[in-house]
Amino acid sequence: MSERGLLIVLSGPSGVGKGTVRKAIFESEDNDFQYSISMTTRKKRVGEIEGVDYFFRTREEFEALIEAGEMLEYAEYVNNYYGTPLSYVNKTLDEGKDVFLEIEVQGAMQVKEKVPDGVFIFLTPPDLTELKSRILGRGTDDLAVVEKRMRIAREEIEMMSNYDYAVVNDKVEFAVKRIKEIISSEHYRVNRVIDKYKEMLKGM
Amino acid sequence: MSERGLLIVLSGPSGVGKGTVRKAIFESEDNDFQYSISMTTRKKRVGEIEGVDYFFRTREEFEALIEAGEMLEYAEYVNNYYGTPLSYVNKTLDEGKDVFLEIEVQGAMQVKEKVPDGVFIFLTPPDLTELKSRILGRGTDDLAVVEKRMRIAREEIEMMSNYDYAVVNDKVEFAVKRIKEIISSEHYRVNRVIDKYKEMLKGM
């Protein structure tokens, strides 16, 4: 009996380097998960392949999927939809493979509602650990600047509280190592494996 | 501001190899935690050092500590008490160091009551993953043998459900690697770091 895969969601404030970390994870050795292929309504560019780069759909098709609850998360940017089709994710998880999503915080919160047992990782900028010095600046900043920094820091922390893990992106290779440790150890969680054992007992 | 250390509890059914795995962890590189020194009422043996091998106490002193709620866990074997003094553990955690306990399942459940945010790791025998074949045997075992195996397997699974992680001890080096991944990733858990960030914001 094979275990169901884990849904891993990497997110964080914009500009934190999510894409770079995700790319480094997939380029690293012994990664054993599937990158979720997004769906979009934007035009296919030269060299892009359906089902590899994106699932390309018309606006009408995409909206029908939203309507039917078939999108795990989606958002609209510059008049085009981008999102994660639920069916592809579920199919991959059922095959026992982990699925890795790298998405914006708004999308991550949509996923959390639909898949609460996913693993939600918040990538934090390295300066969040130097919060105090950054906010206070060098004593030469005016009040408006300090207040803006305070507001941003507060918002980042509020977002973080919805996640399971906070990983500092001080250096890409460190962030990759931490994320891989998290994924490994999540596979050892009792609540993920105990059903398998119980079922083995029941089936006799 | 330094983070409080983690209390890591390694336990599992007797004979699973807890002691061997614990020793291998402490002999391995880049381990950064403190092994909790036990307290006992048994006589000091030649070469043993107070505060290194054990804290040696009289029966009266030990019972006074139990009475005062100063033992994190304890048990009596062959007319001697063995246990973990709370004060030593708390002092070490407050210094920001992780504390590692390797104890029997009865003791682990006492710890869980007192320190629910500890990290509880259940070491499972490799055959638990081969449960079915082991229990069914080679078809030549009589009913009593199969029933005894069923009972033991059921008890082990019941115990496991009180833990956070289940680590298979198929090979000591693999078990060590898994436990280290768990400890690292527990340090990234949002609920362990968010107070630090919030406090930084508040303190300004």
Image (spheres, coloured by chain):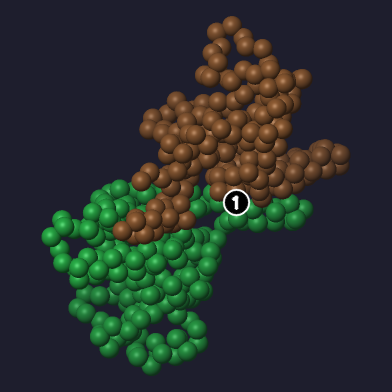
Chain colours: A brown, B green
Seen at 36% across and 46% down, the residue is A1
Image location of residue A138, percent across then percent down = 75, 40
Q: Residue furthest left?
A: B140
Residue that badge 1 annotates:
B190
Image location of residue A169, percent across then percent down = 57, 37
The quarter holding residue A11 reads: top right
Seen at 75% across and 55% down, the residue is B202
Residue A154 shows up from this direction: yes
Along the line of sight, the residue nearer the viewer: A138 or B93: B93
Seen at 63% across and 44% down, the residue is A114
The image shows residue A181, relative to residue B15, as above or below, that is above
- Give, as a three-letter code, the residue at label 1: Val
Image quadrant where one finds the N terminus of chain B: bottom right
Mark 1, secondary structure of its residue: helix
Seen at 59% across and 34% down, the residue is A86
Residue A180 shows up from this direction: no
Along the line of sight, the residue nearer the viewer: B155 or B179: B155
The quarter holding residue A125 reads: top right
